[in-house]
Image (tube, rainbow, N blue to C red):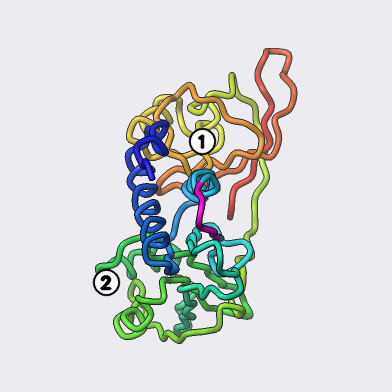
């Protein structure tokens, strides 16, 4: 396997490191005839990795994040003579519940509490909060190897005491996301222009966020202000959330472009 040749077109250093680790696992699968699973990957990393793995002989693979809507997923790689149904998926789901103040905890609180245990982000899959009048709980998807450690060590999230238990993967409740839909117009489809509209930022603020590499489009970090966006793109800003472009319409009389987008609320 010529890793350099396979990755010669990859410019992003973080993506390249992730792909090298995946190819290392491929080599172990081929050499030792065993099943290997990657860390949790972003949709961008999964897409890129699948393109490479499809070109390799002697292996098969699939991706999963524990539920159909999973954003962060692992790749399970195995010898091509094995049937997918024979392969165990090394992820588990934990359910967290708390007291009456439990619904004040947000996604960032959970992630911070878990990372505060000394764990790396790529070992954690989706964190799904359900907070409404009827129910207050959270499902956390993790690598199986971390199950006991988190069960015994994670006692508080923020200032709220929580109780944890393992649940069957099939019991994961997918996120029920509510969106706010908005319409606006921009001078062009440049990322900095659309970013300003979606997050109510000045052009300078948008460009500064891009320069700091805080902005990603479809989970790929973008470093150029003039990158153009398209319908269906998901634009994320670290610490500010994300917006999804639903449609790009015609132009106004002044030449501006109409955009319809939505953001989680």
Badge 2: residue crowd in 10 Å (few <14, some 14–19, many ≥20): few
Q: Is residue 241 visible?
A: no
Q: Nearer the viewer, residue 137 or 4?
A: 4
Q: CA distance from mark 2 to mark 1?
A: 35 Å
Quadrant of residue 26 in the image? bottom left
Q: Residue at x 55, y 37 (%)?
A: 198
Q: Position of residue 34 (x, y in %)?
A: 42, 69
Secondary structure of residue under mark 1: loop
Would you say 160 lies left or right of 131 here? left
Badge 1: residue crowd in 10 Å (few <14, some 14–19, many ≥20): few
Q: Position of residue 244 (x, y in %)?
A: 61, 43
Q: Earlier in the sequence, mark 2 or mark 1?
A: 2
Q: Nearer the viewer, residue 190 or 147?
A: 147
Q: Is residue 186 magenta?
A: no
Q: Is residue 215 visible?
A: yes
Q: Which mark is residue 200?
A: 1
| Range covered by the magenta-colored residues | 56-61
Q: Residue at x 31, y 80 (%)?
A: 149
Q: Is residue 45 above or below residue 58?
A: above
Image quarter hosting the N terminus: top left
Q: Which residue is mark 2?
A: 117
């Amino acid at each position: 396997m010529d890793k350099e040749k396979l990755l010669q077109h990859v410019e992003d250093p973080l993506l390249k490191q992730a792909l090298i680790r995946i190819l290392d696992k491929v080599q172990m699968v081929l050499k030792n005839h065993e099943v290997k699973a990657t860390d949790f990957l972003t949709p961008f990393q999964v897409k890129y990795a699948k393109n490479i793995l499809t070109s390799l002989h002697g292996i098969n693979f699939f991706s999963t994040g524990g539920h159909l809507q999973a954003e962060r997923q692992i790749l399970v790689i195995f010898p091509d003579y094995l049937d997918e149904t024979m392969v165990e998926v090394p992820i588990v789901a934990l359910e967290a519940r708390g007291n009456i103040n439990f619904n004040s905890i947000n996604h960032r609180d959970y992630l911070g509490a878990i990372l505060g245990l000394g764990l790396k982000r790529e070992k954690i899959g989706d964190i799904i909060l359900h907070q409404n009048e009827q129910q207050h709980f959270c499902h956390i998807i993790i690598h199986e190897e971390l199950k006991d450690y988190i069960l015994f060590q994670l006692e508080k999230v923020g200032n709220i005491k929580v109780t944890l238990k393992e649940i069957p993967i099939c019991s994961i409740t997918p996120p029920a996301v509510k969106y706010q839909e908005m319409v606006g117009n921009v001078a062009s489809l440049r990322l900095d222009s659309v970013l300003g509209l979606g997050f109510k930022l000045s052009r300078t603020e948008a460009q500064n966020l891009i320069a700091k590499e805080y902005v990603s489009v479809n989970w790929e970090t973008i470093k150029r202000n003039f990158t153009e966006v398209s319908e269906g793109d998901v634009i994320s800003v670290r610490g500010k959330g994300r917006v999804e472009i639903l449609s790009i319409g015609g132009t106004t009389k002044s030449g501006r472009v109409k955009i319809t987008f939505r953001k989680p609320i």
